[in-house]
């Protein structure tokens, strides 16, 4: 536990990738396999479900620290992180535990799940008393499932690959699905990750998907496309769907569906189960799960007319459900819009060119002949300008823009560019000028800094007799550190009232807010909910009176 | 009658007609210590503890109208008996004791409990009313013994030197810098200092405080091999400037009580945060307040609301004093913990 806490502290202390890589390499070189197995799990984003309710943790920490609850709360507000706060207020102890990470997780922490508050009140303080402050903070982060550290999965992959003398693509391949809840890290699973290449590597795969190939953003003006990308005819162009990226794996008579977060989501989409019959063994398809309602009447060809994809918000509601009843399945049905074929007849097709994969994919879909498996249509245009014109219809079609894939490109790993590139050519976000009315202190790097803001627009036009500001969105990204410091200082000076951690401020700051989608909502005072709101610009040139009003938002609803 | 009240110009003693650490120019200013937010220019008369004279003149000008008193010596002014007592914060820092008509008030300025060898250690002074700072007034702030912090700094310096990497340690140039220089193991390698630090080292040395030999960083060429083994002491403002370029491959650290929090450490963007403060931590504040025996406590700059509420729960008559301390130039880059509401 202490070794892993030290690794965490080292990774946390530096921004240099090389230093992080070196720290991980030296950790893995000396860690016991069963400990390394859990370290890989946490470093590459694995999180067990919360073991102890935060409320219980908080109560125990208050009791054990001897602080008044309000004083603990004040401390938490200043620190911005529950695990760190608890580690700072509990009595400091010497580190006495010699147990490794695996023993801590498997024998001490996982068994806490589901225990009554009385049992937890006995066990937790006894566990805490064995750990020094850094290990204690880490332990609580593991308990609450809030462990995060600034390393990418790619970096973990590289550390393992260099230590084991393997190609990092091979390690990436083996790591897929490692953090899924169904996988319990063990010495054996770790040794498999770093084992020498074997001749039957492919056959051992089971339901393993491939690492997803990820797209890069393309933000240059269309005038430069010819220069940058060559003629449009060299590119396979598709809509950029706003759904859940997924791989459908059919092997050994079974079907697995993996999300882009490498989570096994098969059970969340029962309507796709029927694909187990239509797809032959040794098939892996890459595509997007979307909520789909075929056109009710009129045109037969739903694609050519307008893709009847439904807003992501609907999909989100469905994901949030614990159980999927018949009503939900009827009202919010999903399909998979397939756009790539990664494995066919048991062979890895990722080194085949894009257009060959596409041709084969269309055949697979045709043969399968199942209404839940559709091909993401290929768009054609005379040139880039023609495509740019078509792209303008993105919003009305419910898509985010276009995807550009070179016809001769291979299917890469992650966000690499060495095998060819996928570009996402998104439409500009919606934007409005909004007024900052509440601010809250942030977490982590922004602890004690007012960095999370609530924005409002006016409920009437500038000439209205009397109008008020109605909140409609929260945002906390898009400002530089320097801008955030300035806003923080203005918030402190203009605070009117405090409600717990939230400060209401005298309206004086206007920001251009960008967002991806907009929908009616009963949950918000303004009646409107926006998706991915963030600050595009601080409008220091605008007064509060010049901010937009609700009518602007309603116009965007279309 | 209150011996000290808050006025727009600063904390004011009506009976003696003088101010303590005023932030606007006044006729008579009693100064607790020479940090920029407590000792400002433009006052007609200054009164301070004798060990602080060198620093005060170095900062505010040699020609200021300054009278000094040794610690403990009493001065009668308009019927108010005034004396200075060590605050343990920086060289020359003092608590101001005022006695008038049987009432005793002590204004602490800034103070630290742990003795550090660079200034007279904090002495609790018995009083009826104690004016305390609250910079680190939250239970999350608890300091390690300084010996532990110095050993962390030594280890970091040593590891960097082995890797031929300069160690740049950022800290406030007055007080913290000298405390670190006094506390570290100077045998580990050459010590370079920034131009803002060297003049203050001189004053400390002249006052008889041991500061190991230092080299002015501007005198060393980038190519000089001693660079690679050196510890460099510089103010925080140098950390983000082009001044750092001369060190090529370096590791940077920051020494401050704020480094106790992961968030502030990360926001600073330095390789290492060393938790070392010239202020009292939470247990230190509570201990100091208790030692004074005061029944009434006036809380200034920092976590005012939190400390006031906590003291009231302990049965003390605690109130807040609104001041403009705590925005020292070097301090401003770090966000202070917020003040909580005071419960009526």
Image (cartoon, coloured by chain):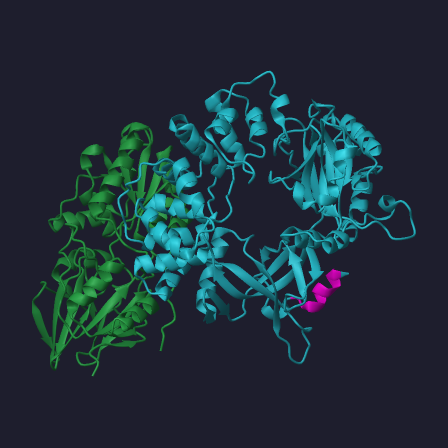
Chain colours: A cyan, B green
Q: Position of residue B155 (x, y in %)?
A: 26, 36
Locate residue B323: give its quadrant. Answer: bottom left
Residue occupying the point 26% across, 40% down: B152
Residue occupying the point 62% across, 70% down: A470
Residue B35 at least partly seen = no
Residue B145 at least partly seen = yes
Q: Is residue A121 left or right of residue B90?
A: right
Q: Is B245 above or below relative to A143?
A: above
Is residue A32 or residue B202 the one in the foreground? A32
Q: Is B288 above or below relative to A14?
A: below
Q: Main secondary structure of the magenta part?
A: helix
Q: Position of residue A78 (x, y in %)?
A: 39, 59
Is-magenta flag for residue A21? no
Q: Is residue A529 left or right of residue A183?
A: right
Q: Which portion, as a residue range, is magenta?
A: A548-557
Locate residue B16: give its quadrant. Answer: bottom left
Q: Give the total of numbered labels.
A: 0
Q: Is B12 above or below relative to B254?
A: below
Residue occupying the point 78% across, 25% down: A356
Residue occupying the point 41% across, 56% down: A117
Q: Position of residue A543 (x, y in %)?
A: 59, 68
Is residue A58 or residue A133 the one in the foreground? A58
Q: Residue furthest left?
A: B73
Q: Is B7 above or below relative to A480?
A: below
Q: Position of residue B242 (x, y in %)?
A: 40, 42
Is residue A29 or residue B98 the one in the foreground? A29
Quarter occupied by the C terminus of chain A: bottom right
Quarter occupied by the N terminus of chain A: top left
């Amino acid at each position: 536990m202490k070794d892993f806490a030290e690794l965490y502290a080292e990774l946390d202390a530096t921004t240099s990738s090389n230093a992080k890589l070196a720290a991980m390499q030296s950790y893995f070189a000396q860690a016991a396999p069963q400990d390394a197995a859990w370290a890989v799990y946490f470093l590459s984003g694995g999180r067990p479900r919360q073991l102890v309710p935060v409320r219980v943790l908080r109560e125990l920490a208050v009791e054990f620290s001897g602080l008044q609850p309000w004083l603990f709360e004040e401390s938490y507000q200043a620190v911005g992180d529950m695990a760190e706060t608890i580690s700072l207020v509990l009595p400091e102890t010497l580190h006495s535990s010699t147990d490794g990470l695996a023993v801590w997780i498997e024998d001490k922490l996982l068994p806490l799940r589901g225990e009554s508050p009385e049992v937890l009140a006995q066990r937790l303080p006894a566990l805490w008393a064995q750990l020094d402050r850094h290990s204690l903070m880490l332990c609580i982060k593991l308990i609450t499932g809030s462990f995060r550290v600034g390393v990418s999965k790619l970096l973990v992959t590289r550390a393992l690959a260099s230590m084991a003398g393997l190609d990092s693509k091979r390690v990436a391949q083996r790591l897929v699905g490692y953090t899924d809840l169904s996988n319990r890290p063990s010495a054996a699973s770790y040794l498999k990750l770093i084992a020498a290449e074997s001749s039957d590597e492919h056959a051992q795969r089971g339901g393993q998907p491939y690492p997803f190939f990820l797209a890069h953003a393309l933000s240059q003006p269309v005038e430069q496309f010819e220069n940058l990308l060559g003629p449009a005819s060299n590119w396979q162009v598709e809509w950029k769907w706003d759904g859940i990226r997924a791989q459908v794996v059919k092997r050994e008579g079974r079907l697995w569906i993996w999300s882009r977060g490498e989570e096994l989501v098969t059970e969340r989409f029962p309507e796709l189960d029927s694909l187990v019959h239509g797809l032959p063994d040794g098939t892996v398809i890459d595509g997007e799960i979307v909520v789909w309602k075929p056109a009710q009447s009129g045109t037969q060809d739903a694609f050519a007319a307008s893709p009847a994809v439904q807003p992501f918000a609907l999909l989100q509601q469905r994901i949030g459900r614990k159980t999927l009843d018949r009503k939900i399945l009827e009202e919010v049905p999903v399909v998979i819009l397939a756009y790539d074929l990664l494995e066919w007849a048991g062979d890895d097709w990722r080194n085949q060119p894009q257009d060959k994969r596409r041709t084969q994919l269309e055949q697979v879909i045709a043969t399968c002949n199942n209404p839940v498996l559709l091909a993401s249509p290929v768009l054609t245009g005379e040139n880039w300008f023609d495509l740019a014109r078509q792209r303008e219809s993105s919003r009305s079609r419910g898509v985010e823009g276009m995807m550009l894939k070179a016809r001769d490109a291979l299917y890469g790993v992650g966000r690499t560019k060495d095998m060819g590139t996928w570009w996402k050519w998104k439409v500009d976000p919606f934007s409005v000028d909004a007024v900052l009315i509440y601010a809250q202190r942030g977490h982590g790097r922004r602890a004690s800094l007012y960095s999370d803001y609530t924005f409002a627009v006016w409920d009437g036009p500038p000439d209205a007799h009397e109008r008020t500001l109605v909140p409609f969105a929260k945002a906390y990204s898009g400002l530089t550190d320097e801008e955030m410091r300035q806003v923080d200082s203005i918030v402190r000076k203009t605070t009117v009232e405090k409600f717990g951690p939230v400060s209401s401020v005298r309206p004086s700051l206007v920001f251009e807010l960008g967002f991806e989608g907009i929908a009616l909502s009963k949950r918000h005072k303004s009646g409107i909910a926006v998706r991915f709101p963030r600050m595009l610009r601080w409008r220091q040139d605008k007064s509060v009176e010049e901010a937009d009003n609700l009518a602007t938002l309603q116009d965007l609803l279309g | 009658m209150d011996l000290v009240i808050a006025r727009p110009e600063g904390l004011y003693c009506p009976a003696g007609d003088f101010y303590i650490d005023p932030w606007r120019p006044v006729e008579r200013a009693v100064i607790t210590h020479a940090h920029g937010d407590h000792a400002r220019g433009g006052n007609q008369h200054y009164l301070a503890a004798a060990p602080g004279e060198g620093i005060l003149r170095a900062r505010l000008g040699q020609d200021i109208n300054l009278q000094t008193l040794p610690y403990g010596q009493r001065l009668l002014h308009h019927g108010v008996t005034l004396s200075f007592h060590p605050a343990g914060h920086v060289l020359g820092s003092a608590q101001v004791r005022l006695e008038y008509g049987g009432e005793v008030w002590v204004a602490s300025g800034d103070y630290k409990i742990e003795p550090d060898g660079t200034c007279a250690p904090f002495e609790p002074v018995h009083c009826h009313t104690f004016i305390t700072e609250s910079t680190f007034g939250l239970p999350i702030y608890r300091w390690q013994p300084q010996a532990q912090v110095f050993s962390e700094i030594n280890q970091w310096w040593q590891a960097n030197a082995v890797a031929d990497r300069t160690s740049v340690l950022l800290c406030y140039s007055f007080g913290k810098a000298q405390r670190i220089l006094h506390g570290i193991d100077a045998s580990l390698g050459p010590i370079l200092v920034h131009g803002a630090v060297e003049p203050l080292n001189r004053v400390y040395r002249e006052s008889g405080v041991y500061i190991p030999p230092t080299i002015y960083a501007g005198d060393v060429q980038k190519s000089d091999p001693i660079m690679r083994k050196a510890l460099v002491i510089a103010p925080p403002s140098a950390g983000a400037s082009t001044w750092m370029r001369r060190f090529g491959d370096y590791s940077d650290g920051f020494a401050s009580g704020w480094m106790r929090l992961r968030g502030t450490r990360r926001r600073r963007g330095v390789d290492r945060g060393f938790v070392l403060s010239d202020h009292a931590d939470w247990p230190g504040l509570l201990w100091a307040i208790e030692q004074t025996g005061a029944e009434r406590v006036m809380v200034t700059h920092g976590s005012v609301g939190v400390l006031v509420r906590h003291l009231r729960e302990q049965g003390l008559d605690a109130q807040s004093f609104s001041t403009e301390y705590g925005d020292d130039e070097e301090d401003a880059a770090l966000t202070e913990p917020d003040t909580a509401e005071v419960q009526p």
